[in-house]
Image (cartoon, rainbow, N blue to C red):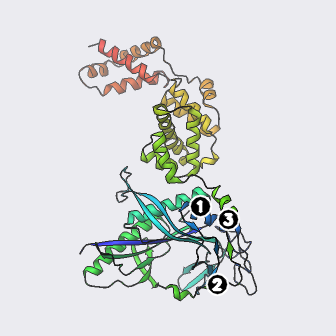
């Protein structure tokens, strides 16, 4: 039988606030000594009272607006009762009946990622958002042999739980959704979105049903996936496993699964709890939360252009390919750097603007990314400003230097922060375009390599590049390539 998969995802976004959700402990816990970033409130000590973190509320509303959600003007907190060693109070302060953000959607571009290769072919999928609400994070358990250790540094860090409707129909769509969500929270400055550090955790709920059926199958949940690849691979594995079980006449059990990344298999962790198991009831120690018009509009005014909208604009206004647009908009600082380079090369419009933008995109995604990767640098720490990069591009466009020389100049700019023109002038790197001077270079090369000349004239045209390279070497890379190659071709033809 042929089956189709139905997937909804619960995502947990750990906020980048200065303090925790309900106390003044620092929310920057990563790398700290275990159980040093705690206080009576986040440890759940008797008599300790929580206080709402206003910035965390604003961050959640920003995420809700980015996900096209309705914003609840009046909501309250609830206790979600369950006991694990990483939850010191024996309950979690959360929201259930009236989430802060609800009834939204997100559009994502979905590509076939099975080969690992980029393709321009994609389709746009709308995924509905059921809810996005605030809660506090738990501590972290570490299991060593027969012993378990708990670190409460993370306990109480603000967390946004985002729940989709079951609109996701493949592992690639799940990958695309979480990738888009990660880009959004980074653009907003709400979270680092670093899955390996637990700042974004994806938990797919999935089931199989006969293709064409409108009845859901038995659902399983895959918990705490810490990479986009793990999300894709675990769903793909479960599709194959459940298909095999159903084809053999078996039944799928509703369980919570973990993902063993080393073996590439899911493992059963526990039976799945239902909402009534948590015994939700209103949190008595916190007042209701009221969002008035002025507060909501002040938050809305701080919203930036989001990645997908920026990607579409780059393709529409700048004529960039889908690949360039996605690469440049994945990070907000990179997108802003690129746009400042384009602006510094302007003013331009129409085809001229597209040519300028493509040149800027090539430099940013090519040489700039290469040097950043080698140096382990972030774009906001660069020595080279967008205006300086634009000046370098202008030197290539007006043929003051050739492309190879420009790359050398850029390396020095990257290391020192010097302007391109100053480097070119101090090192005498200006391009040689004088035809008389280059003609003499051509004759010297042809005289020095008679065998290669004869072989070329006999039909081995690949030797043209060798002869060009020799001429460039004599000019120390400063020859205008177009002028040089035209003179070389003419000189060779005269020898036929």
Q: Mark 2 — residue?
A: 282
Name the element at disc 3. Answer: loop
Q: Earlier in the sequence, mark 2 or mark 1?
A: 1
Farthest residue to the right: give it.
Answer: 47
Residue at left 49%, top 49%?
Answer: 311
Residue at 65% x, 34% y is 418
**Where 44 falls versus 109 (above or below)?**
below
Q: In the rendered structure, are the residues bearing label 2 and label 3 in contact, judged by CB atoms less than 8 Å apart?
A: no
Q: Is residue 279 visible to the viewer in this orientation of the structure? A: yes
Residue identified by numbered label 3: 17
| SS category of the residue bearing label 1 | loop
Depth check, front residue: 44 or 305: 305
Q: How many marks?
A: 3
Determine contact: label 2, label 1, CB under 8 Å. no
Task: Residue 213: give x, y in percent of width and height.
Answer: 30, 75
Is 186 placed above or below 102 here? above
Q: Does dot 2 land on a helix, a strand or a loop?
A: strand
- The answer to which of marks 2 and 3 sits earlier in the sequence is 3
Q: Nearer the viewer, residue 478 or 128?
A: 128
- Residue 192's tag is 1
Q: Is residue 28 visible?
A: no
Relative to the observer, which residue lies in front, 200 or 180? 180
Label number found at residue 328:
none
Q: CA distance from mark 2 to mark 1?
A: 31 Å
Residue 477 % position (x, y): 48, 26
Residue under the point 38% across and 18% down: 486
Give the label, 2 or 1, closer to the camera.
2
Is tag 3's residue or tag 1's residue first in the polypeptide sequence?
3
Could you give the CA–CA distance between mark 2 and mark 3, rounded to whole angstroms? 25 Å
Q: Is residue 175 left or right of residue 453?
A: right
Pick the quarter of the image with the N terminus. bottom left
Q: Nearer the viewer, residue 448 or 288?
A: 288
């Amino acid at each position: 039988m042929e089956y189709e998969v139905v997937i909804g995802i619960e995502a947990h976004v750990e906020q980048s606030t200065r303090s925790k959700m309900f106390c003044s402990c620092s929310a920057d816990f990563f790398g700290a000594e275990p159980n040093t970033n705690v206080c009576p409130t986040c440890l759940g000590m008797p008599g300790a009272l929580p206080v709402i973190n206003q910035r965390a509320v604003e961050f959640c509303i920003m995420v809700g607006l980015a996900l096209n959600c309705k914003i609840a003007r009046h909501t309250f907190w609830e206790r979600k009762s369950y006991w694990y060693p990483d939850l010191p109070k024996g309950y979690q302060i959360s929201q259930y009946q009236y989430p802060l953000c609800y009834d939204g959607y997100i559009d994502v571009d979905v590509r076939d990622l099975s080969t690992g290769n980029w393709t321009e072919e994609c389709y746009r999928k709308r995924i509905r958002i059921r809810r996005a609400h605030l809660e506090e994070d738990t501590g972290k358990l570490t299991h060593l042999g027969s012993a378990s250790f708990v670190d409460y540094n993370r306990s109480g860090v603000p967390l946004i739980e985002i729940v989709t409707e079951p609109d996701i129909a493949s592992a690639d769509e799940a990958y695309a959704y979480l990738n888009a969500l990660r880009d959004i929270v980074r653009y907003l400055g709400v979270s680092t979105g670093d899955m390996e550090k637990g700042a974004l955790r994806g938990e797919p709920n999935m089931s199989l049903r006969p293709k064409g059926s409108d009845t859901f199958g038995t659902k399983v949940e895959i918990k705490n996936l810490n990479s986009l690849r793990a999300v894709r691979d675990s769903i793909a594995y479960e599709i194959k496993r459940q298909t095999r079980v159903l084809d053999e006449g078996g039944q799928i059990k509703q369980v919570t699964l973990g993902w063993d990344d080393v073996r590439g298999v899911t493992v059963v962790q526990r039976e799945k709890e239902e909402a009534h198991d948590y015994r939700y009831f209103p949190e008595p120690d916190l007042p209701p939360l009221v969002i008035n018009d002025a507060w909501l509009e002040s938050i809305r005014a701080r919203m930036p252009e989001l990645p997908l909208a920026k990607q579409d604009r780059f393709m529409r206004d700048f004529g960039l390919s889908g690949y360039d647009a996605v690469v440049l908009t994945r990070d907000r600082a990179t997108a802003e750097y690129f746009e400042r380079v384009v602006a510094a090369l302007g003013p331009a419009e129409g085809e001229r603007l597209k040519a300028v933008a493509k040149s800027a995109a090539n430099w940013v995604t090519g040489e700039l990314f290469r040097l950043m990767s080698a140096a382990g640098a972030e774009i906001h720490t660069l020595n080279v400003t967008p205006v300086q990069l634009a000046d370098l591009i202008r030197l290539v466009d007006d043929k003051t230097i050739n492309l190879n020389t420009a790359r050398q100049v850029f390396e020095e700019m990257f290391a020192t922060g010097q302007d391109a023109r100053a480097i070119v002038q101090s090192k005498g790197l200006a391009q040689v375009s004088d035809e008389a001077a280059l003609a003499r270079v051509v004759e010297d090369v042809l005289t020095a390599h008679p065998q290669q000349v004869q072989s070329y004239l006999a039909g081995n045209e690949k030797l043209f590049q060798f002869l060009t390279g020799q001429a460039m070497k004599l000019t120390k890379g400063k020859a205008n390539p177009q002028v040089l190659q035209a003179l070389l071709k003419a000189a060779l033809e005269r020898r036929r």
